[in-house]
Image (cartoon, helix red, strand yellow):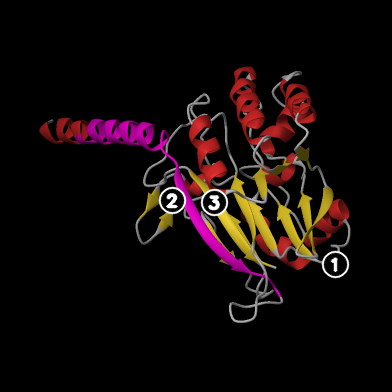
Amino acid sequence: MRIIKYLFSVALLGAGFVLLESKRELKKIKKRYIKINSYDNNADNSHGKPVRLAFLADYHEAENGYLNEKIESIIKEASPDMIMIAGDLINGHDDESIEPVRDLLYRINNIATTYISPGNHEKKAKVHYYKNEKIFEDLMYIINDCDNITYLENDVVTVEHDGKPINIYGLDIDLRFYRRSIGDKLKTKDVFTELGKPKEGYNILLAHNPEYFEEYAEWGADLALSGHFHGGIVNIPFVGGAITPRLKLFPKYTKGIYESEYFPKRKMYLTSGLGQHSLKIKINNIPEIVIIDINI
């Protein structure tokens, strides 16, 4: 009986620690700087000023907008050329999640040109997965009201940096590629079907689901920017992320920079994201905004 009481007390203390630590971490933001050299260049022969991106994903209303001022301040201070958002701004099942998003987008609209791709929550909202008929339309209204923000659903925008083309793609995939248990696996031909042949230049792919990084690399993404896995939720030192929202234990990708096994120099940055939905837990996994300098 004593052992049972002891184990129960330990479990209760552990649960209390998790809740308190998660609450603390979810109210903080880590600013991370990384440098990437393009497919054709290396650190010794790159030329010109790098293009600077501010990258975020999995906003999920970020503590009901509590972090918006911090997000704005960090991005403004970094002075990026462009802002990239790889999906899950909203919670597709929650009408109230649109107001923090509205405030955030109006804030960053005045900082830099912004490109947004869908995540599974935007997809669910669009197809009324949760019988929610309004939130996606509200999101599109806000984006269309911002003259500096573009929503990319299997579309591309080309910009120039130091006379070199940068193609920014936003990938929108079917919900069956997000299923937690038995789902279809995205293949490279599916990416070609949605996006077509990659254009000449440096190709940045906003692709919410990191599980298919090698397919993105094979398609032609020089840099994939992803989220969705929330940094593995609980980050174990020297081990990495413990579990994904798809309930996969110790996944191959959790957060940070990855290089393709089969297409050298093609990379993915996987962010741990800014918010959580449903089960709001983050342990040793502080929300982040990533500032990426790319030598094109």
The residue to which callout 3 is attached is 290
Between 296 and 61, the one lying in front of the other is: 296
Point out the tag, 2 or 1, that comes first from the N-terminus.
Answer: 1
Q: Quadrant of the N terminus?
A: top left
> Which residue bears the numbered disc 2?
242
Question: Which numbered mark, 3 or 2, is in the foreground of this view?
Answer: 3
Per the model, the C-alpha gap separating discs 2 and 1 is 38 Å
Label 3 or label 1, whichever comes before in sequence order: 1
The answer, for residue 243, to whether it is visible in the render is no
Whether residue 29 appears in magenta in the rendering, the answer is yes
| Residue nearer the viewer, 135 or 128 | 135
Q: Which residues are magenta?
A: 10-39
Q: State the residue position of label 1.
A: 200
Q: Amino acid at mark 1?
A: Glu
Q: Is residue 285 left or right of residue 161?
A: left
Amino acid type, mark 3: Val
Nearer the observer, 1 or 189: 189
Mark 3 Cα within 10 Å, few/some/many (few <14, many 20+)? many
Up-down relation of residue 186 to residue 219 (above or below): above
The percent position of residue 201, horizontal first and vertical second, equals 81, 66
How much space separates mark 3 and mark 2, taking CA atoms? Answer: 21 Å
User: Element under label 1?
Assistant: loop
Q: Could you say which quadrant of the image residue 22 lies in? A: top left
The residue depicted at 67 percent of the width and 35 percent of the height is 110
Identify which amino acid the numbered label 2 is placed on: Ala
Kindly tell me whether residue 7 is visible in this rendering: yes
